[in-house]
C-alpha cells in the first residue's frame, strides 16, 4: 500500500517513539485532537499524556520547554501548528537553541516540526516558507523533504540528531504524494542532497514542493529534447554544496527554483556558491525562478500568479538552454 | 571551614543548625561580593576584562539563600545577578574570572562572556541575554525531571524586568497547567537598566502575578539571607512535593549600575543611602555577632582568607591562555 507524505512523517514519529522512550511530543492540539493536520492522530492513545503533551497556545513556551527538556536528556519533538507561527518562538530558536553548543558545549537534541508552504489558499498567515529565517542561523539544522521516503527518513534522522533540527513539511504534499516505502527502519542522512532526475543539458536545483514542479517541467522539456537534471537539496542547513556544484559542472547551466520569495532566498546563496566554486564550468548565467517579493496572497488567481509552476520553469529553462 | 568542605555538603544543610547555615551563607555572600568587586572595580578598570560586566552587589542574599537548598540533581538557571549559584554548585572562582577575561579556562572557552555560562554536569543551564527566555526553558527542564521520575526541582532566577516579557508569562502558565516542579525566584531590584519599577509594571509586586496563574507567591526581604533561606525552603518543599510551581519575590536593590559602564545617575541618592543601610552581608554579620555565632576576630579571618582565595583565582585565570583563532569554527554542530 502506498504511503502518503503525511503518513510517512507519522510513521517516522511513531517508530522513533517506540524505539526511544526519551522521545516525546508537545504542541498545540496534537494530543486529543490529533493535530491540525492529524499527523499525530492516535499518538495520545498509544503513548499517553506523559509523552504526548497538549500545550497552551504559547509557541515561546513550546520551544523553550523543548529546549529545557532536551538539555536534560530527553528528545523533544514539538509542532508549530503552521510554520507561520514559528515567529512567536523565534528568540528561543535562534538565540537559545542554536547557540547552546557553541557557547557552553550543551547539546539540544530537539526537533521543531513546521507545516509550511502555499497552494492551499491559506493566505498570508498559513502559507509562508520561513526556512531562510533559520538557514542563516549557525547551530540550527534545517530540512525540507519533498518525498514520502525522505520525509520518513529525515524525521527519524532529525530525532536522532544531537543538534536542534527544524523540519519543514510542505502542507501541499501531505496527501498529494504517495509512494511505496521500504518496510522496516531506515534513515536519510541530514546534509545530503540527492539527484531526483539525471540529465546533462541543464540543472534545476530546488527543494520541497518545487521538486515536483521541476520534475514536471523536466518531463515536458524532454519531449523537446532538453535533458534536465533535478537536484533535490533535502537539507538546507548544512547545505550540500558539493552535490550542487557537481551537477553544475556536469551540465554547465543552472536554474535555481524555490517557492520562497526572491530576495534573501536560498537561490541567492546557491548562485554565490556556484560563482565562487564552478564559474569556469558555466556556459550561461545562473537564473532564478521564485515567488516574487510579496506576502502570500489569498485569492486563487493571485496565489497562482505568486507561486512558481512548471510553465514558469519551462520558459526560463528553454531560454537558458538556448543561451 | 575550608573551601572544599563548603563546596561539597550542601545536601546536609537542611539538617544543619542555624549557626552553621549562617556560616555558609556568610562565606558565599562574601565570596560573591569579593569576586564581583575584583571583576567590576579592578579587572574591568585595568582593561583586563572587556565587554559587559554585570554584578549582583547588594543582592547576594538571594542566590545564596536559595541555591544552598538545591540538591545535586536539581537544575538551576541563574540570572546575571546570581553569581553565588556558580560558587555553591562548585565552579572554581578562577573559571569565572577566566570567563570574564575571555580565556580558555572560562566556562565557555572564550565563546561567550560574563555571566553567560553553564555546565550540565553541575545542572546549571546558561542564560541568554533576553532573560525571560530562561523561564520556559526552566519549565521544560522541570518537565524532563518529572518525566524521568526524579524528585527534583528547577530553580528559575530572573529580575523584575524579565516579568514584563511574554515568555515569562508563557512559562509560568505552562508550568502551572502542568503542575511542574519549578521555583521561580525573582530578584526585584527596583530597576530594569534605567527603568524604575513604576514604569515596568502597574501592579505593586511581582508576586501579585502568581495568583493569576494559580501559583502560590510569597514576598520576602531579599536582603535578609536567613529569611530568604526559610522562604526558599517553603518554595522548594512545595515544588518537590508535586504541588506545582512556586513564585518567590525577593525585594532588594541593585547597589550598582545596570552594568559597569552605567553610572546610574537616574537613581535618587536617598535610595542608595537607605538600601546601603540594609546591606545583606552587614546584616548577617551583626546578627551572628548578636547571637554569639561568630566573633569579630573570626570575621576578620574570614575576609582575609577569602581575599587570598580570590587572589589565587585571579592568578589562575590570568595564566589561562586566550583562545586560539583556529577554534573559531569548532562546536557549531556536534559533527
Image (tube, helix red, strand yellow):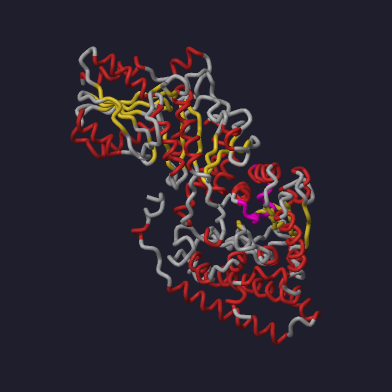
Residue A46 appears in which quarter of the rendering? top right
Quarter holding residue B169: top right
Tally the numbered discs: 0
Residue visible at 64% across and 64% down in the picture: B56
In the shown orientation, is residue A317 left or right of residue B133?
Answer: left
Q: Is residue B157 magenta?
A: yes
Is B23 placed above or below A232 here? below
From where the camera sits, is residue B4 visible? yes
**Which residue occupies the foreground of this view, B241 or B233?**
B241
Q: Does the image show residue A125?
A: no
Q: Is residue B290 above or below residue B321?
A: below
Determine the residue positioned at 74% across, 82% down.
Answer: B294
Please check the rendered image and state whether residue A230 is part of the magenta-colored stretch, yes or no.
no
Q: Which residues are the magenta region? A: B149-166
Q: Identify which residue, A302 or B52, lies in the foreground.
A: A302
Residue B273 at what x, y percent from top left?
76, 68
In the displayed structure image, the side of residue A141 where residue B13 appears, left or right: right
Please identify the quarter of the rendering in which residue B279 is found. Answer: bottom right
- The residue shown at (42%, 21%) is A1
x then y, percent, for residue A224: 22, 12
Vertical position of residue B221 compared to residue B150: above or below: below
Side (left or right) of A16 relative to B206: left
- The percent coordinates of residue A144 (x first, y second) are 42, 32
Q: Quadrant of the N terminus of chain B?
A: bottom right
| Residue nearest the viewer, comparing B90 with A175 | A175
Indicate the position of residue A6 as horizontal and vertical percent values: 48, 26
Residue sitting at the far bottom: B297
Q: Does residue A74 sit above or below A29 in this rendering?
A: below
Amino acid at each position: 500500500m502506498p504511503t502518503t507524505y503525511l503518513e510517512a512523517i507519522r510513521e517516522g514519529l511513531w517508530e522513533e517513539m517506540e524505539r526511544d522512550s526519551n522521545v516525546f511530543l508537545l504542541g498545540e492540539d496534537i494530543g486529543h485532537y490529533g493535530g491540525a493536520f492529524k499527523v499525530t492522530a492516535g499518538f495520545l492513545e498509544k503513548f499517553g499524556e506523559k509523552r504526548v503533551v497538549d500545550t497552551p497556545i504559547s509557541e515561546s513556551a513550546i520551544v523553550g520547554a523543548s529546549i529545557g527538556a532536551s538539555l536534560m536528556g530527553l528528545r523533544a519533538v514539538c509542532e508549530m501548528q503552521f510554520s507561520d507561527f514559528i515567529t512567536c518562538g523565534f528568540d528561543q530558536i535562534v538565540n537559545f537553541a542554536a547557540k547552546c553548543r557553541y557557547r557552553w558545549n550543551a547539546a539540544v537534541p530537539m526537533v521543531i516540526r513546521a507545516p509550511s508552504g502555499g497552494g492551499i489558499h491559506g493566505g498570508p498567515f498559513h502559507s509562508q516558507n520561513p526556512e531562510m529565517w533559520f538557514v542563516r542561523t549557525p547551530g540550527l539544522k534545517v530540512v525540507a523533504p519533498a518525498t514520502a521516503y525522505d520525509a520518513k527518513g529525515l524525521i527519524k534522522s532529525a530525532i536522532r540528531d544531537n543538534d536542534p533540527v527544524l523540519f519543514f513539511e510542505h502542507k501541499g504534499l501531505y496527501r498529494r504524494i504517495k509512494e511505496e516505502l521500504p518496510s522496516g527502519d531506515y534513515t536519510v542522512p541530514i546534509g545530503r542532497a540527492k539527484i531526483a532526475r539525471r540529465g546533462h543539458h541543464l540543472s534545476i536545483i530546488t527543494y520541497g514542493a518545487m521538486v515536483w514542479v521541476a520534475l514536471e517541467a523536466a518531463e515536458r522539456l524532454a519531449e523537446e529534447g532538453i535533458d534536465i537534471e533535478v537536484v533535490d537539496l533535502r537539507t538546507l542547513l548544512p547545505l550540500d554544496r558539493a552535490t550542487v556544484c557537481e551537477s553544475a559542472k556536469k551540465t554547465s547551466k543552472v536554474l535555481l527554483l524555490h517557492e520562497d520569495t526572491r530576495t534573501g532566498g536560498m537561490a541567492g546563496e546557491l548562485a554565490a556558491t556556484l560563482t565562487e566554486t564552478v564559474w569556469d564550468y558555466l556556459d550561461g548565467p545562473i537564473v532564478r525562478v521564485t515567488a516574487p517579493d510579496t506576502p502570500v496572497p489569498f485569492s486563487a488567481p493571485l496565489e497562482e500568479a505568486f507561486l512558481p509552476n512548471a510553465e514558469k520553469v519551462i520558459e526560463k529553462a528553454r531560454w537558458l538552454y538556448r543561451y | 571551614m575550608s573551601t572544599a568542605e563548603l563546596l561539597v555538603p550542601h545536601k546536609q544543610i537542611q539538617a544543619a543548625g542555624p549557626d552553621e547555615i549562617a556560616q555558609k551563607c556568610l562565606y558565599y555572600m562574601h565570596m560573591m561580593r569579593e569576586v564581583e568587586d575584583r571583576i567590576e572595580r579592578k579587572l574591568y578598570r585595568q582593561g583586563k576584562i572587556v565587554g559587559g560586566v554585570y554584578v549582583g552587589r547588594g543582592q547576594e542574599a538571594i542566590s545564596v539563600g536559595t541555591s544552598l537548598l538545591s540538591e545535586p540533581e536539581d537544575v538551576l538557571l541563574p540570572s546575571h545577578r546570581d553569581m553565588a549559584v556558580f560558587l555553591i554548585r562548585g565552579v572554581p572562582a578562577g573559571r569565572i574570572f577566566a570567563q570574564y577575561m575571555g580565556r580558555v579556562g572560562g566556562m565557555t572557552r572564550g565563546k561567550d562572556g560574563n555571566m553567560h555560562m553553564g555546565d550540565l554536569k553541575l545542572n546549571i543551564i546558561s542564560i541568554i541575554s533576553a532573560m525571560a527566555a530562561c523561564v520556559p526553558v526552566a519549565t521544560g527542564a522541570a518537565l524532563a525531571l518529572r518525566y524521568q521520575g526524579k524528585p527534583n526541582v528547577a530553580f528559575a532566577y530572573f529580575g523584575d524586568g524579565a516579568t514584563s516579557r511574554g515568555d515569562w508569562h508563557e512559562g509560568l502558565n505552562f508550568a502551572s497547567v502542568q503542575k511542574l516542579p519549578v521555583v521561580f525566584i525573582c530578584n526585584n531590584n527596583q530597576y530594569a537598566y534605567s527603568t524604575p519599577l513604576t514604569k515596568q509594571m502597574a501592579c505593586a509586586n511581582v508576586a501579585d502575578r502568581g495568583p493569576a496563574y494559580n501559583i502560590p507567591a510569597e514576598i520576602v526581604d531579599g536582603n535578609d539571607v536567613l529569611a530568604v533561606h526559610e522562604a526558599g525552603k517553603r518554595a522548594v518543599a512545595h515544588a518537590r512535593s508535586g504541588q506545582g510551581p512556586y513564585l518567590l519575590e525577593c525585594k532588594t536593590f541593585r547597589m550598582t549600575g545596570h552594568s559597569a559602564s552605567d553610572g546610574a545617575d537616574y537613581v535618587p541618592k536617598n535610595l542608595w543611602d537607605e538600601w546601603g543601610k540594609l546591606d545583606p552581608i552587614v546584616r548577617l554579620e551583626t546578627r551572628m555577632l548578636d547571637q554569639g555565632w561568630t566573633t569579630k576576630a573570626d570575621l576578620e579571618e574570614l575576609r582575609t582568607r577569602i581575599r587570598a582565595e580570590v587572589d589565587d583565582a585571579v592568578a589562575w585565570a590570568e595564566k589561562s591562555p586566550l583562545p586560539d583563532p583556529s577554534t573559531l569554527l569548532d562546536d557549531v554542530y556536534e559533527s
